[in-house]
């Protein structure tokens, strides 16, 4: 009889037992750690989860280390995918089960017995043990024994690196909505999707939507006797069990036998990087940048995009948009996937128009062109300042390099007369110093000098600044090409908050015109 049982038999007060969460690895008993074997062999109680049929994969992995005189606690799930009449639904029934199971283990711990809860893979990685841990670890001495995860096992069985250098690995449950899966798969370098089974068709569709199906590998029951591996595209959905994963391995230095994209038609994708660095990229944009063979753009914007092995980068001056667009289309016509990198949103005073204009020429009409949106400078500055674009607004560029000032002035008058909030792009540069003053004076013909103006400079960048000044005090010397101006309407308001900051906002409701007086 062990010491714990002796104390109980003699009636001595028992010190609380210790709880162990024991990681068993992916399935092959030889991949259990020495510490896991020691803890299982010495435990008073061995607990494990099982489905309704009573069989437990966890117990089968640890079977040869379980003694005949140990107490076994089989924690049988009340349901799997069946319907339930529990008032809390599926989640409520599971919560009740975890509470009951944890109290069963607590009774052993209170009696001074050590309890080893077996967990496939790693106990705190999508494992059932974690539900016991959250309910018991703060009450009893606890130790978690890590185990080899299915992620590591899958990569080992495939014989391919998961991540290298600065690559990012994303681990996803296949139970996520397809849109969410696609967004995250597009934005990452490498990925592992868990919990396939019934989710397989959805996961496959998400991989297709992000043009990553050709990269995807399939691993079923890694390290177990009935293991299966292969290209995910070749797997029949009806044959996929829950214990399987999809793997997108490292893109760096792909293995010699790795599948390659079979499409030979190139394409141009015009992407917007937002006003600054990586925080402003959308998942779709990240995916397009990662998948590109070539990056083409103004050097300042290219510098916002992380370097990737195997990609070609073609930087140029900001004043050669047509030449840059044609170069990108020529590359795509030769079968290359090209991302044209633009700041902000590519359709707002940026590269989308230049690319589409060249793409309309007869020699390029068969080259696929996509435009992916980005956060605009106006939206970024507006968010920093509050909500000045909360009602109707007009966007106008003050640059007279591509259109005469007379046209700009006419549009400013029309927008001001219509009482629209104005987002003014390209307000000034070293060679254009008078436009801001001219625009201010013109707007003062329709707006009061107290009209709030937001000066958003280098939003998201290291020199970001946001100021709110009255229109009558707008100084052209405070404005450069890295600044966007947001000029309020007659309804735009400024408020000083309790912390001293000032915000500006434009009401969504416009005041109704007064009814004419009755005669």
Image (cartoon, helix red, strand yellow):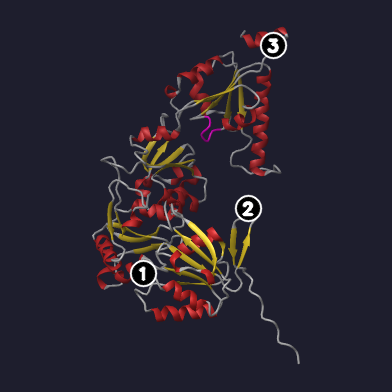
**Spot occupied by residue 13 in the image (x, y as percentages of width and height):** 71, 12
Q: Is residue 89 above or below residue 47?
A: below
Q: Which residue is mark 3?
A: 8
Q: Which residue is mark 1?
A: 353
**Most frequent secondary structure within the magenta stretch:** loop
Report crowding for label 1: few under 14, some 14 to 19, many 20 or more residues within 10 A (C-alpha).
some
Direction from residue 181 to residue 72 in the image, left or right: right
Q: Residue at x 61, y 42 (%)?
A: 82
Res 397 visible: no
Q: Which residue is mark 2?
A: 499
Direction from residue 189 to residue 21 in the image, left or right: right
Image quadrant in which the N terminus is located = top right
**Spot occupied by residue 68 in the image (x, y as percentages of width and height):** 57, 14
Q: Residue at x 37, y 50 (%)?
A: 212
Q: Residue at x 40, y 52 (%)?
A: 286
**Spot occupied by residue 161 in the image (x, y as percentages of width and height):** 34, 37
**Spot occupied by residue 118 in the image (x, y as percentages of width and height):** 54, 25
Direction from residue 472 to residue 163 in the image, left or right: left
Range of magenta residues: 123-127
Direction from residue 500 to residue 261 in the image, left or right: left
Q: Secondary structure at mark 1?
A: helix
Q: Secondary structure at mark 2?
A: loop
Q: Compare marks 3 and 1 and give the one earlier in the sequence.
A: 3
Measure the alpha-carbon separation of dots 2 and 1: 43 Å
Q: Are marks 2 and 1 in contact (CB under 8 Å)?
A: no
């Amino acid at each position: 009889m062990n010491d714990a049982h002796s104390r109980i038999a003699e009636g001595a007060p028992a010190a609380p037992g210790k709880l162990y969460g024991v990681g068993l690895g992916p399935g092959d008993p030889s991949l259990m750690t020495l510490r896991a074997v020691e803890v299982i062999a010495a435990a008073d109680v061995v607990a494990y989860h099982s489905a309704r049929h009573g069989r437990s994969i966890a117990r089968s992995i640890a079977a040869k280390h379980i003694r005949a005189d140990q107490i076994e606690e089989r924690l049988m799930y009340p349901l799997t995918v069946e319907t339930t009449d529990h008032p809390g639904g599926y989640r409520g029934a599971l919560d009740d089960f975890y509470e009951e199971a944890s109290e069963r283990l607590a009774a052993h711990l209170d009696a001074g017995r050590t309890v080893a809860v077996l967990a496939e893979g790693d106990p705190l990685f999508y494992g059932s043990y974690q539900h016991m841990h959250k309910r018991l670890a703060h009450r009893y001495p606890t130790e978690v024994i890590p185990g080899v995860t299915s992620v590591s096992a899958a990569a080992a069985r495939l014989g391919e690196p998961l991540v290298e250098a600065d690559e990012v690995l994303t681990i996803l449950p296949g139970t996520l909505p397809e849109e969410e899966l696609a967004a995250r798969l597009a934005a990452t370098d490498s990925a592992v999707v868990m919990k396939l089974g019934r989710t397989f068709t959805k996961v496959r569709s998400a991989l297709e939507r992000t043009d990553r199906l050709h990269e995807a590998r399939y691993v079923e029951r890694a390290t177990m006797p009935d293991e299966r591996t292969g290209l995910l595209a070749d797997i029949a959905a009806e044959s996929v069990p829950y214990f399987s994963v999809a793997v997108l391995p490292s893109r760096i230095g792909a293995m010699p036998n790795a599948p390659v994209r079979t499409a030979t038609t190139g394409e141009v994708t015009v992407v917007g990087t937002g006003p600054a660095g990586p925080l402003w990229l959308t998942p779709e944009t990240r995916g397009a940048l990662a998948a590109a063979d070539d990056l083409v753009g103004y050097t300042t914007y290219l510098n916002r995009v992380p370097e990737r092995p195997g990609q070609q980068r073609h930087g140029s001056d900001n004043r050669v948009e047509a030449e840059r667009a044609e170069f990108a289309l020529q590359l795509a016509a030769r079968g290359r996937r090209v991302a044209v990198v633009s700041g902000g949103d590519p359709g707002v005073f940026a590269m989308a128009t230049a690319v589409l204009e060249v793409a309309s020429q007869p020699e390029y009409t068969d080259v696929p062109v996509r435009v992916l949106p980005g956060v605009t400078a106006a939206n970024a500055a507006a968010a920093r300042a509050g909500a000045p674009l909360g009602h109707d607004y007009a966007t106008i560029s003050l640059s007279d390099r591509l259109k005469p000032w007379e046209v700009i002035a006419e549009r400013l008058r029309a927008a001001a007369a219509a009482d629209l909030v104005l987002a003014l792009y390209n307000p000034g540069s070293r060679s254009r110093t008078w436009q801001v003053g001219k625009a201010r004076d013109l707007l003062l013909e329709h707006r009061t000098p107290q009209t709030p103006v937001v000066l958003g400079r280098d939003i998201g960048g290291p020199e970001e600044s946001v100021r709110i000044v009255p229109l009558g005090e707008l100084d052209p010397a405070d404005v450069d090409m890295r600044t966007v101006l947001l000029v309020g309407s007659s309804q735009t308001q400024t408020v000083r908050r309790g912390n001293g900051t000032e915000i500006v906002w434009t009401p969504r409701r416009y005041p109704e015109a007064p009814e004419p007086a009755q005669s």
